[in-house]
Image (cartoon, rainbow, N blue to C red):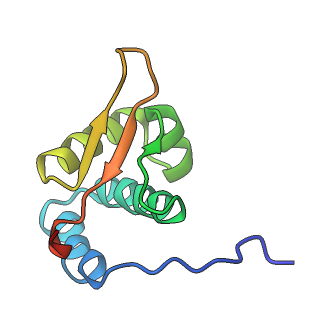
Amino acid sequence: MPRFRKTIPVDDYVFDVLMRDIVGHDRQPATYLVYLHLYGQAARRKWKPVSASLRMLAEATGPSKSAVQTALEKLRCRELVETTSEHATAVPLHRILRHWRGR
């Protein structure tokens, strides 16, 4: 039995624009990996916010915690991810923003 049974559709924009822009132009592959991971998790949760700490994201994607922290800062600056937290030590919630889809 295959481990993964569900295909997740990914917007063309993610491959055609974001990959070239983030990996090629900005030279930030960890940022793209973090975004893809959060995108996949959000899609599986029907676009609800994803609960994930820096450590959880680092373990899931491969880069160090500091690289993940930098990646999240870049994603927030580009308005691709919105992060909220109840308090300083709570596990943050990350909401994927897809501005290219409109409202």
* Quarter the C terminus occupies: bottom left
Where is residue 77 drawn, in percent x and y?
12, 46
Where is residue 2 drawn, in percent x and y?
80, 77
Where is residue 54 drawn, in percent x and y?
43, 34
**Quick one: which residue is furthest to the front in this view?**
103
Q: Is residue 2 left or right of residue 85?
A: right
Where is residue 8 drawn, in percent x and y?
51, 77
**In terms of depth relative to the viewer, which is nearer, 27 or 90?**
90
* Quarter the N terminus occupies: bottom right
**In terms of depth relative to the viewer, which is nearer, 103 or 25?**
103
**In terms of depth relative to the viewer, which is nearer, 86 or 12?**
86
Q: Is residue 85 left or right of residue 44?
A: left
**In terms of depth relative to the viewer, which is nearer, 24 or 12?**
12
Residue 21 vertical placement versus 76 (above, below): below
Residue 3 vertical placement versus 67 (above, below): below
Residue 40 vertical placement versus 82 (above, below): below
Q: Which residue corresponds to the image point at 37% horizontal and 21% vertical from the top-left?
A: 86
Q: Which residue corresponds to the image point at 54% horizontal and 64% vertical from the top-left?
A: 44
Q: Which residue corresponds to the image point at 25% horizontal and 58% vertical from the top-left?
A: 97
The quadrant where residue 16 appears: bottom left
Residue 30 vertical placement versus 6 (above, below): above
